[in-house]
Image (tube, rainbow, N blue to C red):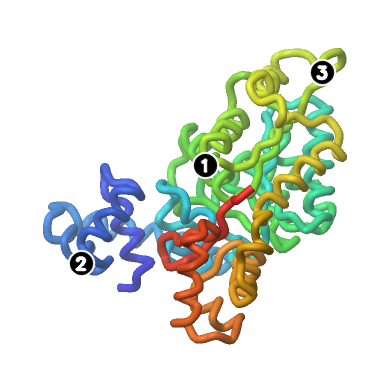
Amino acid sequence: MDRLKKWWVLSGEEGIGPIKLKDRVETLGSLDHAWEWTKGREVHFAAREASRLQSLEATLSDPSHWAFSWEDRAYPIRWRELRDAPIVAFGKGDQRIFNRRSFLAIVGTRDCTQRAAELGFELGRNLAQQEWGIVSGLAKGVDAMAHRGACYAGGLTVACLGGPLNRIYPREHRQLAERIIQKGGALITEHARNSEVYPWHFAARNRLIVGLAQGLIMVQSPVRGGALISAQLALESGVDCWVYRPDDQKERGQRWAGNRKILEEFPDMGWQSMEELFGLLGRAIKAVVPNRLETELAEELLPIWNCIIQKGGVQIGDIAQACGVPTATIDRKLFILELKGMVQRIPGGWYIPRNLG
């Protein structure tokens, strides 16, 4: 049995989530050992194995669908930093884009105003034109407008779903989902084909939207809602967050109350015009490259640093190949960069840049 199937079966154990499963595999030394250990102790293991494999095979019976586990190369590098990221994810579209493009999340309420809908579309269009990938949740309102704006500009956009690929929600967005794929984007979900869809799934997928993004832009939110949850997740996880500042005279009402709530505490996150937002965005992205880079990095370390920065994250073998240097040499230099606090090693042998601003 291949590793993808084992990860999928083991992740279905009742009472065990991604964190506990990864800890078990690490404690027992390997996935194979964890498989045998679980198989020997769980009374109904055979029945669960058959059920989980059936759901996996049903999902992949559609040749346009794919699946990867958290240890696969195509798995989003930024998700590796999430303790509760899905062990296995399913998708449709180009699975290579997650690690080939930097993404910004655009979120907002489903019941949005006309102004918020226009902002969502303009953000998606303008940011896609600047080669940003756009990630959102395919929901009504701001999410859908952001996806549409990115598609209109011919850019890449990713929709994180709260249900399986064969149950696009809302149903009227099935055509939009296909357009996202036609434009080179992707749909991604942690739910296998025909899985039941529950309201809490949509709140849970917000962590995946935030986890993919280098920054998050909240367009509009009441004091309760998924967009506000996403913004709070971004703040808690250290992801840059920018919140539209509603006009006190023209944009009143409860649908803007969430914006005002955040801006009361974090006024520097606010923006009103595209120019103001892009200024904030530019300063944040520049902060990824440390000011001390030129003075502290020896010339021999610069190619390695540049390789990591350009890709957003990379494995040691790929660095060695890109730089034309033996792996043993790269390993020593990566250790120096770790000591300087410039890179971080994460599970799977990946190296990612630290935010040193």
* Picture quadrant where residue 24 is located: bottom left
Q: Secondary structure at mark 1?
A: helix
- Which tag, 2 or 1, sits closer to the chain's start? 2
- Which tag, 2 or 3, sits closer to the chain's start? 2
User: Which percent across, then down, holds residue 282?
Assistant: 77, 47
Disc 3 residue type (three-letter):
Glu
- Give the alpha-carbon distance from disc 2 to disc 1, as whole Å: 30 Å
Whether tag 2 and tag 3 are in contact, CB under 8 A, the answer is: no
The residue that mark 1 highlights is 207
| Quarter of the image with the N terminus in it | bottom left
Disc 1 residue type (three-letter):
Arg
- Give the alpha-carbon distance from disc 2 to disc 3, as whole Å: 59 Å
The residue that mark 3 highlights is 251
Residue name at image x 79 percent, y 49 percent: 127
Q: Secondary structure at mark 2?
A: helix
Q: Is residue 76 visible?
A: no
Residue name at image x 47 percent, y 52 percent: 81
Q: Which mark is residue 33?
A: 2
- Which tag, 3 or 1, sits closer to the chain's start? 1
Disc 2 residue type (three-letter):
His
Quick one: label 1, few (<14), some, or many (20+) residues within 10 Å?
many
Residue name at image x 71 percent, y 31 percent: 269
Q: Is residue 88 visible?
A: yes
